[in-house]
Amino acid sequence: MKAVFLDRNTLSERIDVDIPKGVAQWVAFQKTAPDEIVQRLKPADIAIVNKVKIDESILRQLPNLKLIHLTATGMDNIDKEAAKALGIEVKNVAGYSTESVTEHFFMMLLSAMRSLKTYHANVSDGTWQKDGRFCLTEPPVFELHGKTLGIIGVGNIGKAISKVAEAFGMKVLWAERQGKAPRSKEYTDFDKVLAQSDIISLNCPLTPETKHLVNEDFVSKLRKKPLLINMARGAVVDPQAVYEAIESNRITGFATDVFESEPPLATDPLLKIADHPRVIYTPHVAWASEYAQDKLWRTLKRQVEEFIVKYKAEHKQNEKA
């Protein structure tokens, strides 16, 4: 089988991307523009992609394609229904980045709550020396202990964050889906979570229901000026709504590893608040510890090999029939 990796540069060059067994022809492109997808995948049996978007119009031009394998968990860049209708299997890699994203979440949370940006600058730019006191105490430093953390999207990462938060002495609320009654005593009504939380963590997948979940209506239900942290997808947040919430002091701060367009457009409202002391941005790197990337590729390699073995066995059986 021939396999084509369309965007190798989404993984670190330090990661050993060794070829799965059963792949006779292997081509890896560093990146692929939209108008190059069909040409590069036409001879391929297997497409390996991270963020390249593959819609129905592209899939219909790829009669040889048997498998699309993502080097990620999220699959919103693939038209899964069209792939299914055309007999193309779509696979992802789940669970490889739980530890990495959880650690990144708390890095951002602690940095925002303890005003790391400002205090680092105070030391490096001479502000502390000019002040002369033995310590600086503005802006305020907030503890995690005793705070309420609301989690929207309770998958592996949401549960891992919950466990660490409880170790910090935080109260954790799991939000039920918006407009739904809590499924069990472990879950709390969505609007109650918004009203009671000091910090809100977004960990939900991007779906039509969650696109711009954080909007003006969402912000209007907040009661404690929480810190918002987005570890989900950029489009879960309406950037204009977050910008206005920061400017009107309706939220304490905002930290995100993801943006609606990546990299963000120059017109993204979120860039206008980048200098806020409790606004922290990172370039979609929460998932990407070297351990997580290596685990991702080892899992993908195994799954591709299993697919090839299964496909060949089924094909051989069909020939006999």
Image (cartoon, helix red, strand yellow):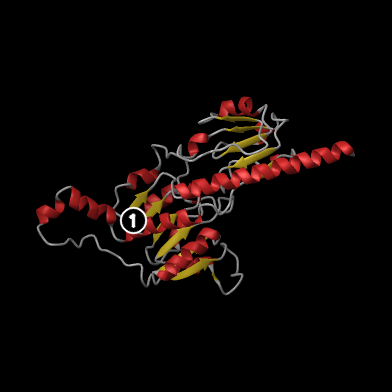
Q: Position of residue 172 (x, y in %)?
A: 46, 69
- Dividing the image into 4 quarters, which one contains the N terminus? top right
Q: Amino acid at mark 1?
A: Ser
Instruction: Farthest residue to the right: give it.
Output: 321
Image-based side of 94 in relation to 163, left or right: right
Which residue was labeled with disc 1?
Answer: 248
From the viewer's side, name the closer residue of 279 and 195: 279
> Which residue is found at the position 46% from the left and 37% from the top?
13
> Which residue is found at the position 39% from the left and 59% from the top?
106
Q: Quadrant of residue 21?
A: top right
Residue 81 in view here: no
Image-based side of 96 in relation to 148, left or right: right
Numbered-mark total: 1
Secondary structure, mark 1, is loop
From the viewer's side, name the closer residue of 222 and 134: 134
Q: Quadrant of residue 26?
A: top right
> Which residue is found at the position 73% from the left and 42% from the top?
309
Q: Position of residue 318 (x, y in %)?
A: 85, 39
Q: Is residue 108 above or below residue 306?
A: below
Q: Position of residue 231 (x, y in %)?
A: 47, 53
From the viewer's side, name the closer residue of 317 and 64: 317
Instruction: Farthest residue to the bottom: give it.
Output: 185
Q: Is residue 127 above or below residue 266?
A: below
